[in-house]
Amino acid sequence: MNINLTMLGQMITFVAFVIICMKYIWPHLTQAMRERQQTISEGLEKAVAAEKQLEQANEAADLELDAAKKQSAELINQARDRANQIIEEAKGQAREEAERIIAGAQGEIEQEINRAREELRGRVGALAIQGAEKILESSVDRNAHEGMLTNLAAQL
Amino acid sequence: MAGDNPTSQEYIQHHLTNLTYGQHPDGSWGFAHSAEEVGQMGFWAIHVDTMFWSIGLGIVFLALFISGARRATTGVPGGLQNFCEMTVEFVEDNITQVFGNRPNAIIGPLSLTILVWVFLMNCMDLIPVDVIPQLALLAGVEHFKVVPTTDPNATLGMSIGVFFLVLYYNFKIKGPIKFTAGLFTHPIPHWSMYWFNFILEVVDMIAKPLSHGLRLFGNLYAGEMIFILIALLPFYAQWVLSLPWALFHVIIVSLQAFVFMILTIVYLTQAHGTEEH
């Protein structure tokens, strides 16, 4: 237990070691640690931001989906309405057409009837005159009896 | 063991003697062969074993940590880097707790060096007391103390180094005038008590490095002493005591390294604080 030069030697050694540690060990390790710390904290921040973004994107997608659903429902309704409308229109047109055709046919029929009636009338008149001529055995003055004949024809 | 059949006292004495190189009373230089010769050499002698082991273990520390720092990446750290960073982080945590976040380039590396180096030197205590001295004896070296921290020269050398740093910061932070004034005006700020204050402060100042170094020395010296005493038992009975003592000593080894580091930080903090006592 003698105090001697060893103390001085130990002191010098100590100082040398501290200086070497200060130069070659401490800064490198602490710097690496700081940088890693920063990298990790940045990464965590980014993860949080990404999560938020994902949430936002999900919300946006949901909104979009809802809108699309609504739109498609609307479109389907519109199409259905339109279809009904077309059917109604077609029905109306068909009815009108049918009525028109019926009306046309009836007109024609009436015309035919009238024509046939006129012809019949003419013929009956002529037949009556012939008959009368034969009966009277003289010719009837057509002009003198025109009035009577027309009257007869009209009564048929 | 010195001699063929040493007595207990001789055995203990032998184990407590350093391998000392110095000037003999007759003027020649050489190794001391006994404790008396060491005593006669006085101050101008050097404990070769203490220096050898402390420098060797210091180089182990530096090599380990430099290779860790060399390969330091900011990405995923490897095993060695992890170990180095854990140690650095532990030291930094303690500094932040005591010293705060003041920027200081020395306190970190200083504390790390002390912690690891002192721990390694203390660890030598766990090697069975006779192994290395016996090997040294075979190599022709008479005395070979293995644990540098059981040599007060080593612990006081470190604590005085810290003390100089404390003085430096006292001067730097407080300024020579305020520092000198503080020696007289503390703790009783009255002119009639200045002489008393000065005595108190000087005693306090000298006591710090002394207690700092002797605390570490005392703990390890006592620990080794007990190992030596256990080694006096018959060889088949030694483990009964040496095993529990070694297990317990593991705590002392790490605790004393930690205490030495914490006290260094505390002293440096005191040197920085202008208000603290």
Image (cartoon, rainbow, N blue to C red):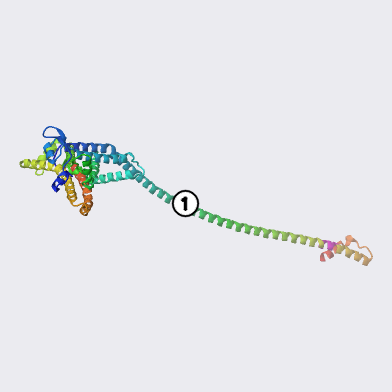
Q: Is residue B244 above or below residue B66?
A: below
Q: Is residue B116 above or below residue A83?
A: above
Viewer-side residue, B65 vs B208: B65
The magenta segment: A117-122
Residue at the (28%, 37%) spot, across then down: A24
Q: Residue furthest front?
A: B4
Task: Answer left or right for A133 relative to B149.
Answer: right
Task: Answer left or right for B73 relative to B177.
Answer: right
Residue annotated with mark 1: A61
Task: Answer left or right for B183 relative to B69.
Answer: left
Task: Answer left or right for B184 relative to A49.
Answer: left
Asked if residue B103 shows in the view, the reply is: no
Q: Give the residue type at disc 1.
A: Ala
Viewer-side residue, B270 vs B55: B55
Viewer-side residue, A86 vs A67: A67
Query: SS at mark 1?
Result: helix
